[in-house]
């Protein structure tokens, strides 16, 4: 888009809505983010701005929170192929892992990775670098299909997720209780509007909570998950501190999984993802709350001016 269309849009509109999964942007993210930045600089309110997508929407937001109670401390990110190949064989020795690409959507490029030989998995000394010919079972969240691969070959395959604009792989501990469902809080600004309980399909290696993989969604009121909602509200200042400020997105989501019971036997939650690039805005209560928050939210330009 040239300067003239940007000028036309800024003269005739107050805001823009960007709703696209990062992996579905023709030509990559850089040109698209440049466009949205120019619209924001022209005074339009953005949903969401590039700054918000990078701060709150990138998969490595989890890594920036791994020193908090929200995310396991062994969560890591690989920004280059060399560090991935040097580190992941040791990371896998600690148990099942989940690799998440930054540009994926609907479970594409999100892999549950475990040793194919269960007896070997039980005998591996944690901290030992596994041989490259170690046999793996790799299940992709997009449709829960499982492939058997060797470690070295699978890492070569995953290199594609690291190269290119904003490429990275997040390496996270697998949470077995994901089969009980993922809990998504949908928010307008700081306000939770509703919760989606996303239960994976039953049987086999299924662990994905996406509709495309057969998961079942149940929409519920925030009050039905009050303990989790309150915990997330208390954690928001910590999230803002670690993700670069409290300039939270207009519409965003936070996905949680049940962790293993703590020492008291009570359920605890692990943050699995934050999304503000392609959040839904369809339910009436969601749309009404969005409009209210949008009307009181300063434009990107005024936020920069007052910063």
Image (tube, rainbow, N blue to C red):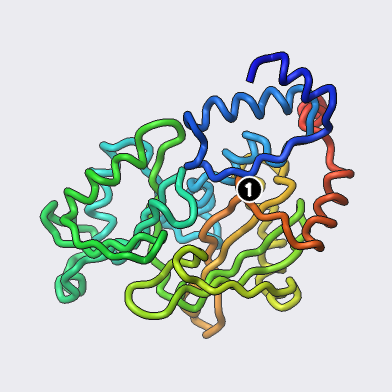
- Residue to which mark 1 is pinned: 276
The residue sitting at 53% across, 52% down in the picture is 65
Which part of the image, by quadrant, shows the N terminus? top right
Q: Secondary structure at mark 1?
A: loop
Question: Total number of numbered labels?
Answer: 1
Whether residue 15 appears in this view of the structure is yes
- Name the one closer to the observer, 104 or 178: 104
The residue sitting at 24% across, 47% down in the picture is 155
Whether 269 is drawn above or below 42: the answer is below
The residue sitting at 63% across, 48% down in the picture is 276
Q: Residues within 10 Å of mark 1 (few under 14, many from 20)?
A: many
In the displayed structure image, the side of residue 129 where residue 45 appears, left or right: right
In the displayed structure image, the side of residue 188 where residue 2 appears, left or right: left
Which part of the image, by quadrant, shows the C terminus? top right
- Name the one closer to the observer, 183 or 76: 183
What percent of the width, then of the height, locates residue 141?
40, 61
What percent of the width, then of the height, locates residue 159?
29, 41
The residue sitting at 71% across, 78% down in the picture is 224
Whether 53 is drawn above or below 203: the answer is above
Which image quarter: residue 32? Answer: top right
Whether residue 307 appears in this view of the structure is no
Whether 265 is drawn above or below 112: the answer is below
- Name the one closer to the observer, 193 or 215: 215
Whether 159 is drawn above or below 206: the answer is above
What percent of the width, then of the height, locates residue 255?
57, 62
What percent of the width, then of the height, locates residue 302?
82, 29
């Amino acid at each position: 888009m040239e300067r003239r269309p940007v000028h036309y849009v800024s003269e005739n509109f107050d805001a823009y809505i960007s709703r696209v999964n990062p992996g579905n942007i023709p030509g990559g993210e850089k040109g698209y983010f440049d466009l949205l930045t120019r619209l924001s600089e022209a005074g339009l309110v953005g949903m969401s701005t590039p700054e918000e997508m990078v701060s709150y929407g990138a998969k490595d937001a989890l890594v920036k929170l791994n020193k908090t109670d929200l995310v396991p401390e062994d969560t890591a990110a690989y920004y280059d192929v060399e560090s991935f190949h040097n580190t992941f064989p040791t990371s896998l020795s600690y148990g099942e892992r989940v690799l998440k690409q930054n540009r994926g959507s609907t479970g594409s490029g999100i892999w549950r990775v475990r040793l194919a030989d269960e007896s070997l998995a039980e005998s591996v000394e944690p901290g030992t670098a596994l041989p490259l010919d170690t046999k793996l079972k790799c299940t992709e969240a997009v449709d829960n299909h499982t492939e058997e691969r060797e470690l070295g070959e699978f890492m070569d395959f995953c290199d594609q997720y690291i190269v290119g604009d904003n490429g990275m792989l997040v390496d996270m501990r697998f949470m077995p209780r994901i089969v009980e469902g993922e809990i998504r809080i949908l928010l307008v600004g700081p306000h939770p509007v509703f919760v989606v309980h996303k239960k994976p399909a039953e049987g086999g290696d299924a662990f994905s909570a996406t509709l495309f993989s057969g998961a079942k969604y149940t929409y519920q009121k925030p009050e039905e998950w009050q303990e989790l909602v309150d915990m997330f509200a208390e954690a928001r200042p910590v999230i803002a501190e670690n993700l670069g400020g409290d300039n939270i997105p207009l519409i965003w989501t936070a996905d949680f999984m049940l962790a293993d019971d703590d020492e008291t036997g009570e359920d605890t939650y692990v943050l699995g993802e934050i999304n503000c690039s392609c959040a839904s805005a369809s339910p009436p209560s969601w749309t009404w709350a969005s409009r209210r928050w949008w009307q009181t939210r300063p434009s990107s330009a005024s936020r920069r001016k007052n910063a």
